[in-house]
Image: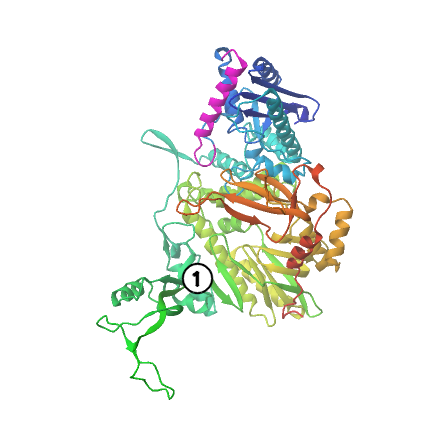
Amino acid sequence: MKLESLFVFDIETYKEVFTFSVVRADGKFKKTFSCSKFKNEIEGIFKCLDYLHDNDYYLVGFNSNQFDWPIIQQLVDKRTKLPKSGKSIASYVFELAQKQIDSFRGEGFGNTVKYEDQYVKQIDLFKVHHFDNRNRMTSLKLIEFNLRMDNLEDLPYDIHSELTEEMIADIIFYNEHDVEATRLFLHQSIPQIEFRFQLTEKYGKSFLNHNDGKIGKDYFQMELENRGVKLHVFKNGKKVLKQTPRPKINIGECLFSYYDFKRPECIAVKEWFSKQTISETKGVFSDIEEHRLGEVAQYAEMTVKRKKFKGVPSEKDREVFLKEHPCGWIEEEELKATEYLFDSEGNHVTEYPLDSEGSPDFTKKPKKVRVPKKSYWGCYRVAETLNILLDGLRVDFGVGGIHASLSEKLVKETSKYKIVDGDVSSMYPNIAISNRVYPEHLGEEFCDIYLDVYEQRKSYAKGTPENAMLKLALNSVYGDSNNQYSVFYDPMYTMKITVNGQLSLLMLAERLLEIEGLKLVQLNTDGLTVALPRDKEDEYSAVCKKWESDVGLELEFVEYERMMIRDVNSYLAIYKKGGVKRKGAYQYEGLGWHQNQSSLVIPMAAEAAMVKGEEIESFVREHFAKGNKFDFMLRTKVDKSSKLVLVSDEGVDVEQQRICRYYPSKNGGKLVKLMKALPDSEDKSDRRLSIDSQWKVKTCNNMKDFDGDVDFDYYVQEAEKLVIRKVTEKPQ
C-alpha cells in the first residue's frame, strides 16, 4: 500500500449547495467541487472519480460507507440523467441525502453499496476503528479534539438555509477542514490500513472495512468452511446462518467438574450458579434480591431498596408486599409535618390544655390533637451484583468476569512481602480448548480447528500480520457467541466460558489464601494479584502449578514494586523490572480514539506525585511552561436538541459549538447546557445545567483564541483526587 494510492474525501449536502472535497493522502493534491445556483462543477466530480477508478485508487472517508459514498454512487450510476443546473443538482443530492438518513435502522444506515459494486473502492475509517459499535461510537469532531487540531470547526449553517456566495465559501471551507481532519486521522491509522491490505492480498477477500473483531470472525469462518463445516442452512427456501438459540440455559449444566471449594462462601457461590436457569445473558447476575441469593446472602454485601406506600398500608398491602419480597419488612418514618389525629370512628381526638401543675385544665376549651405525619415504606435487600466477601475483600461476579480489588490503597513491596500478578494466558480461548467447549451447531470439530488456530499463532512472531489476525480470530469467538447475528451464536457457549472462568479464578484465590500471610490485592477477569510473603514463594508456585494442572490453563507472572489502587478499574502499577502499567483514571497514553482525552496533565501530575514524589502544582506549571497546552484542554458535547452557552459575569449567554473545547480560567465565564423544558413542567423556559460548575472557563475551538490564562488550581485539585497515599495493612 502506498499513500499515493489513497485519496481522502468528504461531501456536504445542503438544500442549496452540494460540495465534494478530495485530497491525496500525502497532501500534494487538493480539489473541491461545488454545485449551486452560482456554479455547476458536477462534470469535474465525475472526471475526478473516473481518474480514481481508472487508476485503481482508493477513497478514504469517515462514515463514508454509510452516508457519503451511497450518495456519490447514485450520482455515478445516473450521471446521464441528472438535472442540468447546479442548483437543481444540489437539490437532487439533498433529497438523496435525506433518504439516506431516513434509511437509518439503529446501528448504521440501511442503504450501503457492496464492495464489489463500488465505482471507486472505499476505506471507511469509521468501520476500521469500529466506531459503529454503540459503546465506541464517536464523531469526526471528537476525533479532531483528540488529534489536537488547532481549529475545531462546526457546521456553519442550517442545511435548509438560503445561502449567499459568501456562505457557500464558508461551507466549502468547512468541507475542506473535515477532509484534512480525516487525512490526519488516516495517517494515525496507517498500521491498521496496511494490515488490512496485507490480509486482503493474501486471502483474496476484502478486509479493508473490517474492524478487528470482524477480521477475526471472518478468518475463523474461512477456516471452518475449509474444513467442511457448514455454516448455513436453508429455512423456508432462504439461506440462513446456522445457530443455536437457547430459550433457557441451565447454568448447572455449564459447570465443569474440577471444583473442590473448601470455604463456605465459595461453596455457596458455586451452588448458587448450579441452581440457576436463565432466559437471557445480559444483567442476569445483577440486582439479585436477598431471598434469591440463598446461602450466598450471608456472605454478600447488599443495599436496601424501598417502595413507598400510599398512606397506611392495609393488611392486604403488607401481605402482597411480603409475598413479592419474602425477606422484606415494613418501616414507618416520622415526618416533620403534622396532621390531626382521628379515633376509630373518624372523630377528631381532643385534649385539654395542661395547668401549671401538669394536670388537664377542664375550665378551658379542648384542642384538636395534632401528631407527626408518617410515611410507610416496604424495604428489601438487593445485591447489586452477585458478590461475596472473601478474606475481607468484596468479590463481584458477572457476565463480564470476576472483579475484586482493594480501593484507595497504596501497596508496596517490602523486605518481607513481594507483589505478584498472575494472568491466565489467552484465558477464554484456552478454557474452550482445554474443556472442548463449542457452539452446538458447529460440532466438536470446532474444538480441533480452534486448537489448530491457536497453534498456528505460535508459529508466527509477535508483530506480524499473521500473528495479529490469528489472535483476533481466537478472541472474537467468545464475544460473538452472544451475538444473535453471528454464526457462532450459542449463549450456552458464552455462559460456559464466563462462569467457569470466574469459578476457576475463585478456586485459585481460595487455594492461595491457605498460604499463611498471603493477602489478596486484586481479582480482575483473567488474573489475580497478591501480596506474597517472600518465604512462601515455593508454596505459592506449587499452588499455582497444581491449579494449572487441574483446570488446564497457564499463568504468566510479573512482579510489581508498587500499586496505587483507586478501584478495580483505575490503578497504577510499577513493574519491578521497570515501566508503569496505567489503568482507567490514570491512563494518559494509548487511549482509544473514541475515548475522552481531556486534561491529560491531571493523570500525569498524579503519577509524578506518586511515582517520583514531585509536587503537583510545580509539575502542572512546569508542564505548561514547556508548551504542552493541549494537555490542559477539555471538551464537552451536547446533542442537537440542546444548546451550549458561555455565561459572562454580566449574565449574557453566548452560544457555543455543540462540540466545544475549553479550559478553566479565572477570567472566563460559566459553561452551561440549555435543555428544553420537560413536557409536563409548568415552567417552559430552558433547563440549565452547569458544566464544571465550580469553575470559570474560556472556550478555544480555535487555538488562536487561547491566551494562556489557565487556572492551575483546577488541575492541581483534580490531580490531588487521584493521589493514593494510604498504605494497606499488609504489606507495610
Q: Amino acid at mark 1?
A: Ala
Residue designated by label 1:
383
* Residue shown at 37% from the left, 86% from the top: 358
Residue 555 appears anywhere in the view: no
Classify residue 463 as left or right of residue 554: right
Q: Is residue 665 above or below residue 81?
A: below
Classify residue 171 as left or right of residue 366: right
Secondary structure, magenta segment, majority class: helix
Stretch in magenta:
83-108
* Residue shown at 49% from the left, 13% from the top: 82
Give residue 105's position: percent from left, percent from top: 43, 34
Classify residue 549 as left or right of residue 233: right
Identify the image's colour scheme: rainbow, by chain, secondary structure or one colour.
rainbow
Question: For numbered disc 1, what is the local secondary structure?
Answer: strand
Give residue 261's position: percent from left, percent from top: 47, 66
Using a 10 Å C-alpha cutoff, classify the residue at mark 1 as few (fewer than 14 neighbours), some (14 to 19) or many (20 or more).
many
* Residue shown at 27% from the left, 75% from the top: 349
The quadrant the N terminus occupies is top right
Q: Is residue 631 above or below residue 719?
A: above
User: Is-magenta flag for residue 659?
Assistant: no
**Closest to the observer: 483 or 545?**
483
The quadrant the C terminus occupies is bottom right
